[in-house]
Amino acid sequence: MAEEPVYYVVSDLHIGGDEQLEDVEFLDELLEFLDELAETDETAELVINGDAFGLWEFTTVEGVEKFDVLEATYPELFEALRRAGENVTITLLAGNHDHELAAYEGYVDRFAEYNVDLVQEQSISRPVGDRAIHFEHGHQRDPNNRIEDWGNPASTPLGYYYNTLVTSRAGQLSDRGRYNWLKDVQAVTPTERMPVWLFSKYFYREMNPLLRYSLVPFLLLFNISALLAILAGLDIVGVWSMPVDRTEAFLSRFGRAGTAAWFLLVLNVSVAGLLVLVGVPLYFIRRDVRQTIDRFGVFETELTVDPSAPYEEAAREALADEETVIFCFGHTHRPMIREVEGGLLVNTGTWLKRLHRRDGIIGVLPPVFYPSYQMAAVRIAAEPEGIAVDYLPMEKPSPATEELTLTERLFTVGREPELELPDRTVVEDGRPASSVGTVESGPEPSDGSRPEPSDGIERAGTE
């Protein structure tokens, strides 16, 4: 009797790209994982479920020539694939970033040299127990990254231009900064956060340190200064002078030090008051402009795809076939398990760095984007109790110590992200039999707090 197959699934490695994007920060962990597969006694198949490579981010070569660059840049990786492929089956699906894998037949033969079976279809199905797993990358459910003419290299959705013009350019320029940070633009999700992320990195990394440290006290105290500016205005018009009089009397007790503090306070309050006065009309102008734009329908749709709804709908369609029990995808970089129509919707997450926004508690300082890793391989197998889905974490410490400035680390003390992968889940008699722990990284609370569990089987954690 043949042994039941075991499936290991990874996605969204995004290996390769122009210049600084060549750096694969998780390469050691990936090689170790492949070496383990090369030694396993299981009848296993590794499914690389899209976006293994960042082919969109190569702008100096075309077509199958990109394979030559990958092969020359990552010889250890391809040798590890060859060794693992001698022991287990390795199946590679194309995503949006590496859609060209489905567009050129030459890629099939080149990957076959390393024991990798490149499937150029949009999806595949694999048996598990008496049921089946549906695999697809998921970008076809995303209007910004959908390939309308599958297999046509000239089919270029909106996401293609973002990555060829923005992400690849970031890779070319990243090493010109005070710190090599710009290449992390590919880890910024959703893309609406990119302007805020750029301003944050400019403030904490690129701004002249003397200028930054001179601004920090003012920005920290901005909320207090704005309140004092309002009180000062009430004093000037003769409505209420007590707060100003009391403050001046208190500081006068400290002689020259009190005088200096009074001068700095007046200066701070003056600037804050000016910003408040300017900000009020600007707020109404901005709101009116936004309403006008909305009337013309310019921003009728969001820039990024809903991370859940389209995939739930796709899962329901796939699970309508009673044979299919799991819909497995990637693309959104959010590890997740969710019950849908008696089956499971499973997202494999990403091996890229994750960036977690932490807004300031007080003042108007730019938010800090705290880096971490949440790498995992999903294991799907038929067990005696049912079809089991497990997340196998690949441990890698947060690079915060090396990548965050002292100021950023101080502002995030006690607010570091607590990463959780979904719990083991077993499908028995057509229904998940165990509790499900999900990690869905949509926009998390800006204060870094943990959201409360939602009703039903789903459990949410922080990014």
Image: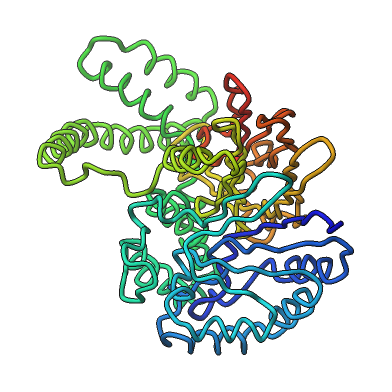
**Depicted 206 relative to depicted 132: above or below:** below
Residue placed most toward the observer, 187 or 454: 454
Residue at x 76%, y 48% (from the top left corner)? 381
In the rendered image, is residue 208 in sight? no
In the image, farthest residue toward the front:
1
Residue 186's spot in the image, x, y percent?
49, 62
| Colour scheme | rainbow
Q: Quadrant of residue 382?
A: top right
- Percent coordinates x, y for residue 388 in the rendering: 75, 41
| Residue drawn at point x = 53 percent, y = 82 percent | 107
Residue 342 located left or right of residue 377: left
Using residue 30 as the reference point, say whether residue 274 is left or right of it: left
- Residue sitting nearer the eye, 280 or 428: 428
Closest to the observer: 88 or 22?
88
Residue under the point 57% across and 40% down = 345
Q: Horizontally, is 181 left or right of 145 in the view?
A: right
Residue 219 x %, y % = 44, 40
Q: Is residue 10 above or below residue 245?
A: below
In the figure, residue 198 lies in which quadrant? Answer: bottom left
Q: Could you tell me which quadrant the N terminus lies in?
A: bottom right
**For the image shown, how many numbered marks are present on the structure?**
0
Give the side of residue 52 with respect to residue 396, left or right.
left
* Quadrant (top left, top right, bottom left, bottom right) of the C terminus: top right
Q: Which quadrant would residue 25 be assigned to in this image?
A: bottom right
Which residue is rendered at x = 60% and y = 64% of the image? 13
Q: Is residue 302 visible?
A: yes
